[in-house]
């Protein structure tokens, strides 16, 4: 099996347009992989939203790390972590890279803003750009720290987000690329792809460009491909999709005092068991738990017997009830 870091590097340099899909926990990481995507964007926005906090570094970096570890365990495709500003200065970035490598996270993206960051789509007044040299130092520190040559460090340009022009964006991109960045994420919050296309027309370096077309989503992907973009990131769509469904389902159940109306719209419990790979545990139980033959010689007294369920357990709701596991 190709290392995840090598898989991610393969996406950066495949020579065609590739796509990353957002995930924010182990379950969504698995769904992204099952949908056929070749990589995952661990979005700061959706990780924090799923934790019930704001995208302002309210979740600590170790809390983020814990979640991406679940995501990595639940999937076999590479993860690009949206690591905000790197959670501090170059020294925090060094420790971050060390910890990401331990958790088999293939790549991280850091943005040239000041900690604590504010989501790029929120109030422009609260966005503060980092000093370019200081940010380049973080990139260098990350590249010097990584042990796996294929771990990737993506530098994210926030110049357009702050209303600065193409020259500022290009100057910074050249600086970050010469500091060792493996890719440049150009962010824009316009409804049109104009800033991205203008950047691409001037970008001649052999350093792949990534984009996040959340606001200019109507642009056909072919246009990005023709412009030379290497990776498109669908940054928040699973969280937004599930939020819409959860709001509607919760409200219907509350209003009808029943789940009948939504039963057909939700997955059966056995689908959740499949996603959790419960079958593997069943097989492991047969292998590792004592067999029926080696059960205790003295029968268990009736007062210790498990209670008989008061309702019929349908196969729809339960994979099995294994008495040896009770
Ligand atoms: C994220 O998904 O957290 C991003 C992209 O950083 S954005 O929300 O557009 O800033
Ligand atoms: Mg983010």
Image: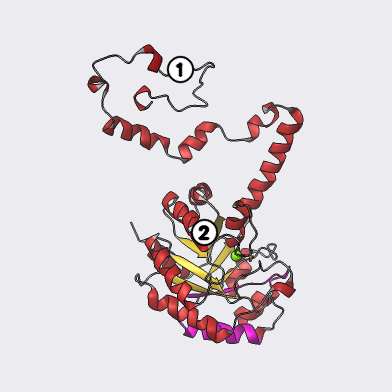
* Label number found at residue 307: 1
> Which residue appears farthest toward the top when viewing the image?
302
In this view, the residue in front, 88 or 229, is 88
Rendering quadrant holding ligand 1: bottom right
Crowding at dot 1, Cα within 10 Å, few <14 / some 14-19 / many 20+, comes out as few
In this view, the residue in front, 157 or 251, is 251
Q: Which residue is mark 2?
A: 64
Report x, y in % for residue 296.
25, 19
Report x, y in % for residue 221.
61, 64
Q: Secondary structure at mark 1?
A: loop
Report x, y in % for residue 215.
70, 64
Q: For this view, does 156 lie left or right of residue 262?
A: left
In this view, the residue in front, 164 or 9, is 164
Q: For this view, does 194 lie left or right of residue 269?
A: right
What range is drawn magenta here? 167-193
Q: Quadrant of the N terminus?
A: bottom left
At 66% from the left and 63% from the top, the residue drawn is 214
Residues under labels 1 and 2: Cα distance? 41 Å
Please say if 219 is above or below 199.
Answer: above
Q: Secondary structure at mark 2?
A: helix
- Residue 233 visible in the picture: yes
Crowding at dot 2, Cα within 10 Å, few <14 / some 14-19 / many 20+, comes out as many
**Tag 2 or tag 1, which sits nearer the N-term?**
2
- Quadrant position of residue 246: top right
């Amino acid at each position: 099996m190709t290392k995840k870091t090598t898989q991610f590097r393969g996406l950066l340099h495949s020579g065609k347009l590739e796509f990353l899909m957002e995930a924010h926990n182990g379950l969504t990481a698995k769904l992204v992989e099952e949908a056929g995507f070749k990589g995952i964007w661990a979005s700061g926005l959706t990780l924090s939203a799923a934790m019930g906090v704001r995208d302002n570094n309210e979740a600590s970096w170790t809390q983020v790390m814990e979640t991406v570890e679940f995501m990595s365990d639940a999937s076999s495709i590479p993860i690009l972590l949206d690591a905000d500003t790197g959670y501090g200065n170059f020294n925090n970035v060094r420790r971050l890279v060390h910890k990401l490598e331990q958790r088999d996270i293939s790549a991280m993206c850091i943005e040239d803003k000041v900690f604590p960051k504010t989501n790029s789509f929120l109030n422009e007044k609260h966005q503060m750009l980092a000093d370019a040299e200081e940010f380049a130092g973080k990139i260098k520190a990350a590249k010097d720290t990584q042990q796996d040559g294929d771990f990737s460090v993506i530098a994210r340009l926030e110049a357009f987000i702050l209303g600065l022009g193409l020259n500022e964006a290009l100057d910074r991109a050249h600086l970050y690329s010469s500091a060792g960045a493996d890719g440049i994420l150009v962010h824009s919050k316009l409804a049109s792809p104009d800033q991205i296309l203008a950047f691409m027309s001037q970008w001649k370096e052999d350093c792949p460009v990534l984009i996040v077309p959340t606001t200019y989503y109507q642009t056909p992907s072919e246009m990005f491909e023709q412009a030379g973009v290497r990776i498109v990131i669908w940054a928040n769509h699973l969280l937004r999709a599930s939020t819409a469904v959860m709001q509607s389902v919760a409200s219907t159940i509350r209003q009808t005092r029943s789940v009948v109306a939504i039963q057909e719209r939700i997955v059966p419990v056995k689908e959740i068991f499949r996603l959790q790979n419960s079958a593997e545990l069943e097989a492991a139980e047969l292998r590792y738990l004592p067999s029926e033959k080696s059960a205790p010689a003295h029968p268990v007294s009736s007062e210790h017997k498990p209670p008989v369920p008061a309702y019929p357990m349908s196969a729809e709701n339960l994979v099995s009830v294994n008495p040896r596991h009770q």
